[in-house]
Amino acid sequence: MFELPELMTLAKQMNDTLKGKIIRRGQLGNSPHKFVWYNRGHHEFEKLTKGKKIGEARPKGRWLFIPLEPEYVLLLGECGGKVLYHRPGSKLPKKYHLYITFEDGSFLTATTQMWGAMELYEKGKENDRKYVKGMRTTPIEPEFTLDYFSSIIDDCARAEKRSAKGLLTQDQIIPGLGNAIAQDILFRAHLHPRHSIGDLSGGERRALYDAILSTIDEIEKKGGRYDEHDLYNNSGGYVRIMDKNAAGRPCPQCGGKIEKMQYLGGTCYFCPDCQK
Ligand SMILES: [Zn+2]
């Protein structure tokens, strides 16, 4: 699944490569799949996208907003899989859930792995979409300050018992983070996934805040995680510190053995010595 840094990479590459291109033909998928969420029929999608110009793409949480100018916005949300640019004359992938050809013969395909939204909105209406509407401040917005972060910790801790992993991965409290990035954030912040956020000291809050921003920044700079692909079908350059390959290996910091556990709907990898 794409998390915020991968969407930042895709948006940047789209702005380098796709921005300004004119759509010759926009098509939905050839591979029916009930977890791909469309809000238009094939014919309608083709009609509404024809002749539109690709505007400046931007990520927000786990959603990618791609303006189709004038007047429309294509939303790719909660997706995993591949969103790929193809040069003119390239071979079309066998399965796709979106296939947009441009006037210059190049094309874009999107094939989602598990689920995902591929929806076309009249400009402005995309903001009313469930999960987009009312989305909390994302970590790449200037409003995501340490004070703001501390205030959401206070709010969450007052409402119910919540762990550090829960803060990062549940209910999109910090939109755009997911199970993959959360593991490295917690390692960098020296926090155990189960650590109750109600007990976080001022220093621990700052460490967690800094770890969120630095991890996003590093993954984005390296073009995404190594197990995801960018717009040009290259694997990302960011090798995760804490993932399935880490279990049983020595911790890069203390040399102790990295452990794994099932917790909150996913496997956690962590160092029991470094993460308290
Ligand atoms: Zn360690």
Image: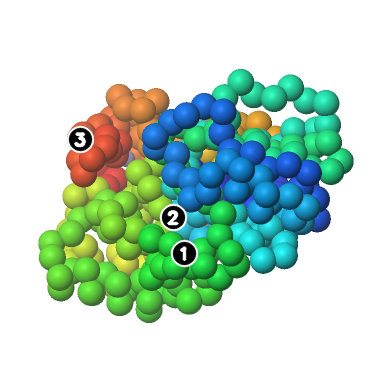
Q: Is residue 258 above or below residue 178?
A: above
Q: Is residue 108 above or below residue 122?
A: above
What residue appears at the point 74 percent right and 22 percent down from the top-left corner? 91
Residue 139, how many percent across, how many down?
A: 46, 64
User: How many residues crowd mark 1 within 10 Å: few (<14), some (14–19), many (20+)?
Assistant: many
Marking on residue 176:
2
Q: Give the amino acid type for the residue marked by disc 1 in the picture.
A: Pro
Q: From the Cβ of disc 3, is ligand 1 less than 8 Å away?
A: no
Mark 3, residue position: 262
Earlier sequence position, callout 2 versus callout 3? 2
Q: Are marks 1 and 2 in contact (CB under 8 Å)?
A: yes
Q: Residue furthest toward the right?
A: 104
Mark 1, residue position: 139
Image quadrant in which you'd find residue 35:
top left
Residue 141, how many percent across, how many down?
A: 52, 70
Q: Give the amino acid type for the residue marked by disc 2 in the picture.
A: Gly
Element type at mark 1: loop
Earlier sequence position, callout 1 versus callout 3? 1
Instruction: Check the picture and name the quadrant holding the N terminus.
Output: top left
Q: Give the amino acid type for the residue marked by disc 3 in the picture.
A: Gln
User: How many residues crowd mark 3 within 10 Å: few (<14), some (14–19), many (20+)?
Assistant: few
Image quadrant in which you'd find residue 266:
top left
